Amino acid sequence: MGFLDELFNRNTDKEEIKMLGRFSDAYKPSSNYKVWEDALLAYENEEYLKATINLLTFLKNPENKNISYQTAENEVTFQFFQGSKTISGFQNETKFRAEAKIAQTDDIKIGLSRRLLEKNYLLKYSRFALDEEGNILLIFDSYTVDASPNKLYQGLKEMATQADKLDDLILDEFSDLRPINNEHIIPRSEEQKEKQYVYLTHKINQCFHEIETSKLNIDQFPGGLSFLLLDLNYKLDYLLTPEGFLMDNLEKNHRVFFANDKSEVALKNNLFIKSFRKILEKDKEEIKAELYDVISTFGLPVPTPHETLTQLIESELNKMQWYKENKHTAIALAIPSYVVGYSLFSYALPMPDMKLLDLFYRVTESEFLNNGEFINGDTPNARRVKKEMARIENKYKSIHPHLDLNASAIDFSTMLTFSESFLNLIKDINLDHA
């Protein structure tokens, strides 16, 4: 199976599963290959209920806490979690139906109706509805005979991810709505949320200060400013894993910047800055309310080979040189950090890559993440970093026998030399399979 076989091998060590950042459903046990193939075969043989049961089994994550289902004669009922939303449904001999309750209202307003109607046009499989109890629903249904595993997977993914994104946003926008079916979210401690809020505002203000005091002519070098803003965007997304308004803002920043609309980089930078100012203007308690943990079934980052990361490092890292030579250290530091953040935001890379990119943040943001465990003053803690690299190599050596994390290639003298040499090491590793 090659690359994908390695991707579906994340559950062998519980310590390896716990990572920051966005959830990806790419890291399932290799046994799920057989379950998916069984689902396709059962559907081809017109064993529709068996096909759906196999699909639901396939959707289980390694921890097996995201989905449950019950079978009776000629029917299966199920429930699964996607972030702050619960999706429930059934399939019998004639029909498949799934729904997510997004929010509850006593009187749906014209503005909300228009908002949902506009979103309806963007949906391929699901649609909005209002039930008799005043619950705003997102529904996906199909005749059983048409409910192939591929169709069900795509339809459920669309409705689940859209429902999860929308609930916090419309609750924030329309104050008369009430939350519903979010009892399963995992609250963070008040101390943790306070620490994360302080980090959030500090990092944004730090970025603004760098922009205002930089000796770089931003009009002539807007790309330098872009690196600062992109680095900040992905760092906040990965390290805080927020929901609601904050998550939506970070995602919009990404989409706007990389939209192929021929907008000037300077204009995109200004939109970025406005977005971060909105975050600073947001009420503190409202931001903290979006800092919680969730269980998910579907993920957005897609399986991506190591070669994609190699190409990104090669194309971006050489842009550090001019900024280094001209003493624009903050921008030079932002470039490798942007590469790391963009990769963790966009891709589900092989696990050695993911763990090494995570380690990069463990070092560069050590004070926030682990009370300075990976630094000595202002420089990386070489002994601690080498120990972690050895653990990663030993963990994945059986899958990638040519994996050699030679820490002697890393320059630990400053954070800047570390960042550059560490990414060059990642670029050159060999992830060929046994």
Image: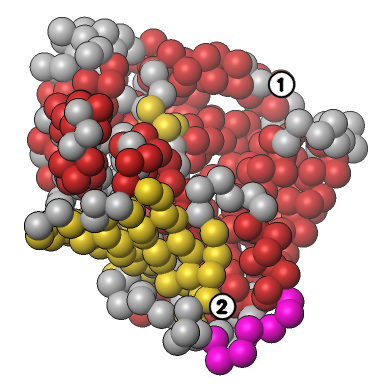
Q: Amino acid at mark 1?
A: Trp
Which labelled disc corresponds to residue 37? Answer: none
Circle 1 sits in a helix, a strand or a loop, which is it?
A: helix
The C terminus, quarter of image: top left
Residue at position x 25%, y 12% from top?
2
Q: Is residue 132 magenta?
A: no
What x and y, as percent, mark residue 270?
82, 50
Q: Is residue 252 left or right of residue 164?
A: right
Answer above or below: position of 268 versus 318: below
Count of residue discs: 2
Relative to the observer, which residue lies in front, 118 or 185?
118
Q: Amino acid at mark 2?
A: Leu
CA distance for labels 2 and 1: 46 Å
Q: Is residue 35 left or right of residue 305?
A: left
Residue that extends furthest to the bottom in the rendered view of this protein = 106
Q: Work out whether residue 403 can be spotted.
A: no
Residue 192's spot in the image, x, y percent? 36, 71
- Judging by the rendered image, the residue that carries numbered circle 1 is 322
Which quadrant does the N terminus fall into? top left
Give the main secondary structure, helix, strand or loop, of the magenta stretch: loop
Closer to the camera, 180 or 90?
90
Q: Nearer the viewer, residue 396 or 178?
A: 178
Q: Residue at x 41, y 80 (%)?
A: 180
Q: Disc 2 designates what residue?
A: 171
Q: Residue at x 10, y 60 (%)?
A: 72
Task: Describe residue 148's horizontal placement relative to residue 129 as left or right.
Answer: left
Q: How is the image coloured?
A: secondary structure
Q: Is residue 194 above or below residue 318?
A: below
Closer to the camera, 172 or 405?
172
Q: What is the x, y in percent for residue 190?
A: 36, 79
The residue that appears at 40% across and 50% down in the rendered structure is 142
Residue bounds of the magenta highlight: 105-111
